Image (cartoon, rainbow, N blue to C red):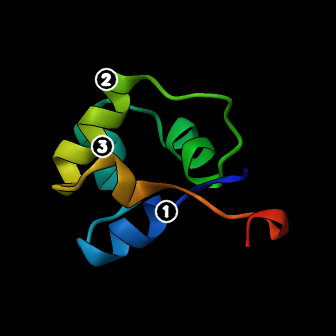
C-alpha cells in the first residue's frame, strides 16, 4: 500500500512554486522538499491544512494511495 505525494502536480496546476508555498505556510524549503519527495514518516494535520488552504485543494488532491499488484 504505497502512499504517493502529488504535491508537485498540484503546485503546477495552481501555478505556484515550492518557494511560495513554503513561505506562505511558514515551512522551510528543505522540509517542504522532504514532504514532496515522500521521505517523511508523517505530516501534521495543521501543516496539511495550511498546504490545502494555500493551494485551495483537498488532502486527497495531494496525497494518494497506489494499488499494489495484489490488489489489481
What mark, if any, has residue 46 been given in the picture? Answer: 2
In x, y percent, where is residue 3? 64, 50
Q: Residues within 10 Å of mark 2 (few under 14, many from 20)?
A: few
Mark closest to the chain's N terminus, 2 or 1 = 1
Q: Is residue 6 above or below residue 58?
A: below
Say which residue appears at 31% left-offset and 30% top-offset. Answer: 26
Mark closest to the chain's N terminus, 3 or 1 = 1
Check disc 1 and report its element: helix, strand or loop: loop
In x, y percent, where is residue 53? 17, 44
CA distance separating discs 3 and 2: 9 Å
Check disc 3 and report its element: helix, strand or loop: helix
Q: Residues within 10 Å of mark 3 (few under 14, many from 20)?
A: many
Q: Is residue 5 above or below residue 12?
A: above
Q: How many marks?
A: 3
Q: Is residue 17 above or below residue 58?
A: below
In x, y percent, where is residue 55? 22, 56
Q: Residues within 10 Å of mark 1 (few under 14, many from 20)?
A: some
Which is nearer the eye, 14 or 2?
2
On the rendered structure, is 34 left or right of 12?
A: right
Q: Are marks 2 and 1 in contact (CB under 8 Å)?
A: no
Check disc 2 and report its element: helix, strand or loop: helix
Q: Write down the residue under mark 1.
A: 6
CA distance separating discs 2 and 1: 18 Å
In x, y percent, where is residue 23? 29, 41
Q: Write down the residue under mark 3.
A: 51
Amino acid at each position: 500500500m504505497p502512499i504517493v505525494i502529488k504535491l508537485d502536480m498540484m503546485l503546477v496546476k495552481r501555478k505556484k512554486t515550492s518557494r511560495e508555498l513554503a513561505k506562505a505556510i511558514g515551512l522551510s524549503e528543505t522540509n517542504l522538499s522532504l514532504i514532496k519527495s515522500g521521505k517523511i514518516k508523517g505530516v501534521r494535520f495543521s501543516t496539511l491544512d495550511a498546504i490545502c488552504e494555500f493551494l485551495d485543494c483537498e488532502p486527497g488532491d495531494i496525497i494518494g494511495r497506489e494499488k499494489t499488484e495484489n490488489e489489481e
